[in-house]
Image (cartoon, grey):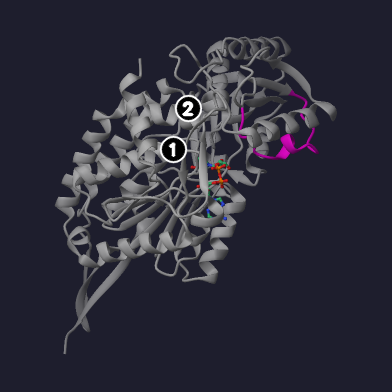
């Protein structure tokens, strides 16, 4: 199994080129970058990072491609190319899912069924919107004119490693559909699927220079993109501190438009008075907490039970622990695995430190899986209770397979627990009473509120965070185009 996909991985690594610029494979001139499999700890290959000079070259190629005009001006052609690219992505779905499984420790099963399909759906969704802006016609005594949406020009995109190919689709599909040229920097922990995507984009007919991919670290390639005077807009998904650094870089350079999708600390609220099946709610909360090893900005890092019925609370707690106990931790390529590794040593150490600190300050361990593989970077699914507010786990984003059970008496306390956080990305409420759903929706302030089942919405629904989970702009939905377009007025004076 995976024989063909192993061939695709070896071909990418064997070529030794970490950059795809102006339609060509290019070898990086920066530091060597080892690609490490989190599941085994093995170095699967090595590429060289882009140097700062190569970031300049990629941006120059994007500027040339944008100025050439053909791509930006021909919406129907862009739509055709993006649809062709969606087809190619699906044709090579197994290879792409394999690359993310090996390099980023994603479950092959999930990546194939969800992430790769999501990219294709994104490309098709935005293909449908290409060149569809009908603008606005206006007139008064002084003249007449119209307002239209135009591409910003060159878009930089900087991605995290947790959903490598899906996050790529979230940025690249709307940016290309709007008529821009893109310089993309995937995370240094997950670069291969982006390189394969660049190759498929060229095959689909994306013109040279319209999509450029750079392997590189944040400190060199990411920083250079943030400061670059010819990058007109930058779409970023990642951590808050890096997002803030990019805002500063924009202010210090050319005031490029910045849209930031940042961290989260989602709650999973169980409104006990309106839950018919506590076991179903518990199983869904566990899936929401431990999917992608909890390394998900919308992972339910707090499960909040609302109600005073002791017997039902114990039943729910036991169901939560039982559902977590059913998680099979194992090789991301194994179809039977429900949870894979965490991304790297630093993540493994951080998660362990935070949990140990919380326990030393009084947290209770409700569940911790007994075994995880010895090689590679792993952390067992863990559920805590009584997590002290003065611990890092009490306030921060754990970004790992750890959740905590919290119990409150009133709905208002649950609302405060969500709205009182600096994060406001997503949350779930399990509540089967429609009137009460409205009550929750009117009070909870997050970008995506899922009801009766964890969800991030669809490619057609905007995704992004309130408060410090985001800064302007949304991924997905027609709203995603706003980050990559300018409103332009054409006014014809009437003498
Ligand atoms: P990160 O911020 O460390 O890295 C993200 C990207 O930024 C990487 O490509 C990295 O190379 C680059 N980078 C690092 N330093 C940089 C700098 N100084 N200048 C420019 N670029 C730089 O985040 P991560 O560890 O890859 O991902 C985890 C974080 O991402 C979590 O906080 C998570 O919640 C967040 N995230 C948010 C969403 C969302 O949609 N809101 C989705 C996924 C992940």
Provide the major secondary structure of the magenta segment. Answer: loop
Write the start and end of the magenta stretch as one range. Answer: 385-400
Q: Position of residue 55 (x, y in %)?
A: 42, 60
Q: Position of residue 118 (x, y in %)?
A: 34, 33
Q: Is mark 2 within 8 Å of ligand 1?
A: no
Q: Which mark is residue 181?
A: none
Q: Quadrant of residue 446?
A: top right
Q: Position of residue 418 (x, y in %)?
A: 63, 38
**Marks 2 and 1, how far apart in space?**
9 Å
Residue 216 falls inside the magenta stretch: no
Q: Which residue was labeled with disc 1?
A: 164
Q: Are marks 2 and 1 in contact (CB under 8 Å)?
A: yes
Instruction: Name the one closer to the observer, 256 or 493.
Output: 256
Q: Which mark is residue 106?
A: 2
**Crowd around label 1: few <14 · some 14–19 · many ≥20 (10 Å):** many
Residue 36 sits above or below residue 234 on the image: above
């Amino acid at each position: 199994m995976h024989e063909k996909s192993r061939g695709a991985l070896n071909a990418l690594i064997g070529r030794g080129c970490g950059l795809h610029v102006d339609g060509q494979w290019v070898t990086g001139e920066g530091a060597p970058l080892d690609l490490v499999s989190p599941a085994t700890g093995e170095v699967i290959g090595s590429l060289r990072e882009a140097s700062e000079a190569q970031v300049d070259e990629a941006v120059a190629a994007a500027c040339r491609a944008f100025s050439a005009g053909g791509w930006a001006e021909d919406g129907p052609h862009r739509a055709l190319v993006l649809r062709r690219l969606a087809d190619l992505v699906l044709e090579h779905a197994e290879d792409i899912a394999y690359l993310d499984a090996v390099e980023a420790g994603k479950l092959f099963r999930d990546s194939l069924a969800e992430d790769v399909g999501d990219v294709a759906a994104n490309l098709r969704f935005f293909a449908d919107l290409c060149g569809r802006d009908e603008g606005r016609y206006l007139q008064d005594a002084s003249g007449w004119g119209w307002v239209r949406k135009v591409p910003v020009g060159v878009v930089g995109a900087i991605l995290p490693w947790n959903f490598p190919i899906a996050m790529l689709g979230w940025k690249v599909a709307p940016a290309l559909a709007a008529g821009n040229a893109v310089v993309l920097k995937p995370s240094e922990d997950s670069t291969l699927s982006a390189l394969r995507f660049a190759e498929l984009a060229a095959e689909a007919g994306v013109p040279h220079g319209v999509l450029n991919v750079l392997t590189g670290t944040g400190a060199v390639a990411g920083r250079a993109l943030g400061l670059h005077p010819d990058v007109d807009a930058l779409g970023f998904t990642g951590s808050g501190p890096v997002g803030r650094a990019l805002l500063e870089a924009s202010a210090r350079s050319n005031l490029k438009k910045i849209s930031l999708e940042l961290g989260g600390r989602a709650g999973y609220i169980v409104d006990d008075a309106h839950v018919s099946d506590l076991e179903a709610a518990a199983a869904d909360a566990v899936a929401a907490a431990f999917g992608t090893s909890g390394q998900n900005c919308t992972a339910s890092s707090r499960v909040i039970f609302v109600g005073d019925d002791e017997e039902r609370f114990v039943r729910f707690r036991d169901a939560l622990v039982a559902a977590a106990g059913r998680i099979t931790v194992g090789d991301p390529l194994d179809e039977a695995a429900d949870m894979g590794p965490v991304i790297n040593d630093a993540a493994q150490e951080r998660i362990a430190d935070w949990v140990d600190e919380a326990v030393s300050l009084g947290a209770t361990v409700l569940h911790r899986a007994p075994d995880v593989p010895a090689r590679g970077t792993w952390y067992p699914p863990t559920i805590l209770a009584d997590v002290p507010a003065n611990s890092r786990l009490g306030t921060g984003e754990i970004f790992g397979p750890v959740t905590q059970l919290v119990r409150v008496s009133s709905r208002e306390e649950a609302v405060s627990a969500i709205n009182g956080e600096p994060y406001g990305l997503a949350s779930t409420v399990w509540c089967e009473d429609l009137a009460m759903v409205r009550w929750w929706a009117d009070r909870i302030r997050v970008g995506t509120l899922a009801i009766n089942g964890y969800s991030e919405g669809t490619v057609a629904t905007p995704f992004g965070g309130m408060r410090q989970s985001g800064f302007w702009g949304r991924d997905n939905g027609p709203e995603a185009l706003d980050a990559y377009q300018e409103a332009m007025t054409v006014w014809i004076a009437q003498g």
